[in-house]
Amino acid sequence: GQNIDQPTEMTATEGAIVQINCTYQTSGFNGLFWYQQHAGEAPTFLSYNVLDGLEEKGRFSSFLSRSKGYSYLLLKELQMKDSASYLCAVRDSNYQLIWGAGTKLIIKP
Amino acid sequence: IAGITQAPTSQILAAGRRMTLRCTQDMRHNAMYWYRQDLGLGLRLIHYSNTAGTTGKGEVPDGYSVSRANTDDFPLTLASAVPSQTSVYFCASSDSTSGNNEQFFGPGTRLTVL
């Protein structure tokens, strides 16, 4: 079966750094996505990794290791507006996205 | 304004009733998708369409049907609603010819079946 695992909930402090991990087992791999979803809103695209390594985009970075079936999203200089759920998704061999349940990130002042 | 819209925003429906959720995008994306999102679960694909005139079944298609008569519209129909179809429904679209083929999501429809 296909499986995406990420922690259910994490808490961090404003101004700090947090790393959200994602491990996956899928039938095929054609890229990994991270999305942000604020409560009651639609998911919005954050990052995409298809090759191993780190992709940096402002305060957010995403890392991929295909051999380990592992990715993480790194958020730096946390702001209160970063309180949201972060969704990991893998594009499988059928080019469909398989989604994790999401990690709810709570930022405390 | 470019984007993807869904209607209605929310709906309470009696079990056994027929319901169509509407989705329209103006980005000329070739691919469109319907997902449902339930607490504690990841987004689950119901149906998809890679191009106008074609549709395919996702992970949880039973009880749902779709059509794709043109590029912009992708309605989702529940023929006879059941309480287990209570969920938040998201429509999404993507341009499979571009870069990473990221999906853009509509604002969602919150459906309650009683």
Image (cartoon, coloured by chain):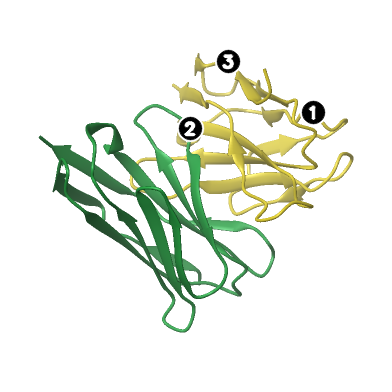
Res B97 visible: yes
Coordinates of residue B17 in the picture (x, y in percent):
61, 20
Hue used for the chain lettered A:
green
Coordinates of residue B78 in the picture (x, y in percent):
64, 29
Q: Is residue A70 above or below residue A74?
A: below
Q: Closest to the observer: A8 or A16?
A: A16
Q: Which residue is mark 3?
A: B8
Q: Chain of mark 3?
A: B
| SS at circle 1 | loop
Res B13 visible: no
Mark 3 on the same chain as mark 1:
yes
Q: Closest to the observer: B74 or A10?
A: A10
Residue type, numbered disc 1: Asp
Q: Is residue B28 above or below residue B7?
A: below
Residue type, numbered disc 2: Ala
Q: Which residue is mark 2?
A: A42
Q: Earlier in the sequence, mark 3 or mark 1?
A: 3
Chain that is coloured yellow in the picture:
B
Q: Is residue B79 above or below residue A91?
A: above
Residue type, numbered disc 3: Pro
How crowded is the residue under tag 2: few (<14 C-alpha within 10 Å), some, or many (20+)? Answer: some
Q: Closest to the observer: A96 or B94?
A: B94
How crowded is the residue under tag 1: few (<14 C-alpha within 10 Å), some, or many (20+)? Answer: some
Please tell me which residue is depicted at 79% across the width and 48% down the height of the picture.
B50
How crowded is the residue under tag 3: few (<14 C-alpha within 10 Å), some, or many (20+)? Answer: some
CA separation, marks 1 and 2? 19 Å
Residue B48, quarter of picture: top right
Q: Which residue is mark 1?
A: B72
Q: Label 3 near label 2: C-beta < 8 Å?
A: no
| SS at circle 2 | loop
